[in-house]
Image (cartoon, rainbow, N blue to C red):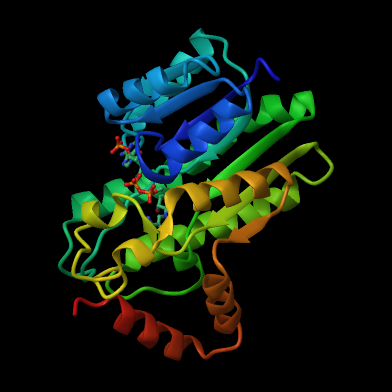
Amino acid sequence: MTNNYALITGASSGIGAELARLFAVDGIPLLLVARRQERLHALQEELSCFVDVKVFPCDLSDTASRHSLLAYIAEERMTFDYLVNNAGCGQFGAIAENDWAATEQMLQLNMLALAQLCRQLLPPMIKRGFGRVLNVASIAAFQPGPGMAAYFASKAFVLSYSEALAFELKGSGVSATCLCPGATQTEFFVRAAMDDSGLVKGKGKSLASARTVAMQGYQAMNSGKVVTVHGLLNRLRVFSLRTAPRSMVTAITAAVLKAK
Ligand SMILES: NC(=O)c1ccc[n+]([C@@H]2O[C@H](COP(=O)([O-])OP(=O)(O)OC[C@H]3O[C@@H](n4cnc5c(N)ncnc54)[C@H](OP(=O)(O)O)[C@@H]3O)[C@@H](O)[C@H]2O)c1
């Protein structure tokens, strides 16, 4: 049991909500962050019988809102043993045709919010000699993704950043773990307007459940593992990418992603 909190971003649905449930059952108090207030409050109500749950509705793609979150943390004098950078979104479409404002928001959320929260929350963890960071990337992190180029590149950032962070933290008592899920049953694809993508079309229930993905990330984080890829098939895919020519990998990814 601890009095220090876990900050979980993107806790209003999908993998983030499942992660929140796992922390709560283990008695770790929570600060849940996402934009949809009603979803956060519903989860707060569900989990309050286990632990103290605070919520802070916040658009993490917005610099000023991120500052408000950090100001709230300082005002409340909250300390964290856990930081879960899970919030993320995707954008489907060609680089030259996509809405730039949406691309910019996605890059802010997937990369800058994650990096800023690491930068701000790590020093007290290092000082106390304990902390765990879980950053959610994707198997997209291992390859270029024509049709979702900026999303794939943002997840490559998360993977590279997390591996470097884990190295920097060696011996500090603080660990960094990068969770790389494959296609998972959440609201992600609907929100990224990817219903017609070959990645998910017709696959429905064969996709991994948010619960099993969250569980794997949670266990890997607690054991201090640096990178964890969810699912045997995904691990084989990632392994095969190491030796395959990059141009071939790019072409295959484009073919898999494109609308059918
Ligand atoms: N589903 C997959 O197939 C898959 C595969 C690989 C990796 N991932 C990654 O897994 C993570 C979780 O996604 P998910 O699959 O669980 O999808 P999801 O159900 O859509 O969850 C995304 C979460 O991020 C939050 N979020 C989105 N934009 C935000 C913003 N601007 N500010 C604050 N919070 C924001 C959402 O809450 P609000 O909308 O309420 O803000 C939601 O809680 C993401 O990083 C995603 O890239 C997903």
Write down the quadrant of residue 60 in the picture: top left
Which quarter of the rendered picture does the N terminus lie within?
Answer: top right
Indicate whether 162 appears above or below 194. Answer: above
The answer to whether residue 68 of the structure is visible from this angle is no
Residue 170: percent from the left, percent from the top? 80, 46
Which quarter of the rendered picture does the C terminus lie within?
Answer: bottom left
Indicate whether 23 appears above or below 51. Answer: below
Q: Residue at x 61, y 78 (%)?
A: 239
Residue 5: percent from the left, percent from the top? 59, 22
Q: Residue at x 51, y 38 (%)?
A: 19
Q: Residue at x 19, y 76 (%)?
A: 259
Q: Nearer the viewer, residue 23 or 92?
A: 23
Give the farthest residue toward the right: 171
Indicate whether 246 appears above or below 215. Answer: below
Residue 236: percent from the left, percent from the top? 58, 78
Q: Residue at x 40, y 83 (%)?
A: 250
The answer to whether residue 94 of the structure is visible from this angle is yes
Q: Is residue 96 left or right of residue 26?
A: left
